[in-house]
Image (cartoon, grey):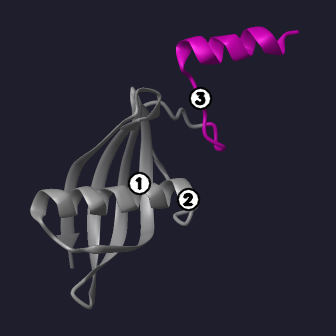
């Protein structure tokens, strides 16, 4: 029964910890599995939104690496690969997501070389 009060405090105060004991709220944590379907979904969303805004035809290829940050939702910083008219390019994207309110927003998208 000691576990129940601890779990309630974690829920109420929003304190969570990474495997190494680092506090995760507000800290950027490296994504260990860039091929995770959730991470890929965020990467694809970023490319789709960028294409809508810029009238581009980039195609999502993969997530190379990334970081996420728990805030009043989730911030995602990803390095991705996109295909642009036959050539592969790297991009950096920043996406904010608040799944409980069904909010997902592309904050920035930049092609890097």
Residue at 18% of width from left, 59% of height from top? 52
Q: Is residue 3 magenta?
A: yes
| Image quarter in which the C terminus is found | bottom left
> Which mark is first along the chain, 1 or 3?
3
> Which mark is first along the chain, 3 or 2?
3
| Whether label 3 touches label 1, CB < 8 Å | no
| Residue occupied by mark 2 | 37
Q: Residue furthest bottom?
A: 86
Q: What's the mark number on residue 25? A: none
Picture quadrant where residue 35 is located? bottom right
Q: Residue furthest right?
A: 1
> Which mark is first along the chain, 1 or 2?
2
Query: Residue 110's spot in the image, x, y percent?
Result: 19, 64
Q: CA distance from mark 2 to mark 3?
A: 22 Å
**Helix, strand or loop status at disc 2:** helix
How many residues crowd mark 1 within 10 Å: few (<14), some (14–19), many (20+)? Answer: many
Residue at 40% of width from left, 33% of height from top? 102
| Residue occupied by mark 3 | 16
With 113 as the anchor, is 55 left or right in this view?
A: left
Q: CA distance from mark 3 to mark 1?
A: 22 Å
Residue at 61% of width from left, 17% of height from top? 11
**Helix, strand or loop status at disc 3:** loop
Q: What's the mark number on residue 42? A: 1
| Whether label 2 touches label 1, CB < 8 Å | no
Can I make out residue 104 in this image? yes
State whether residue 53 is above or below residue 113.
above
Picture quadrant where residue 48 is located? bottom left
Report the front residue among 60 and 107: 60
Residue at 38% of width from left, 62% of height from top? 44
Please state the extent of the stretch shown in magenta in the rendering: 1-21
Query: Residue 22's spot in the image, x, y percent?
Result: 56, 37
């Amino acid at each position: 029964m000691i576990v129940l009060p601890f779990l309630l405090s974690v829920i109420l105060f929003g304190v969570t910890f990474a495997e190494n004991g680092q506090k995760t709220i507000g800290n950027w944590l490296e994504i260990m599995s860039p091929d995770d379907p959730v991470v890929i979904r965020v990467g694809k969303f970023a490319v789709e939104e960028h294409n809508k805004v810029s009238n581009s035809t980039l195609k999502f290829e993969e997530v190379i690496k990334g970081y996420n940050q728990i805030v009043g939702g989730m911030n995602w910083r990803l390095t991705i690969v996109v295909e642009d008219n036959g050539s592969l390019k790297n991009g950096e994207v920043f996406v904010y997501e608040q799944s409980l309110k069904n909010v997902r927003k592309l904050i920035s998208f930049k092609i890097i070389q």
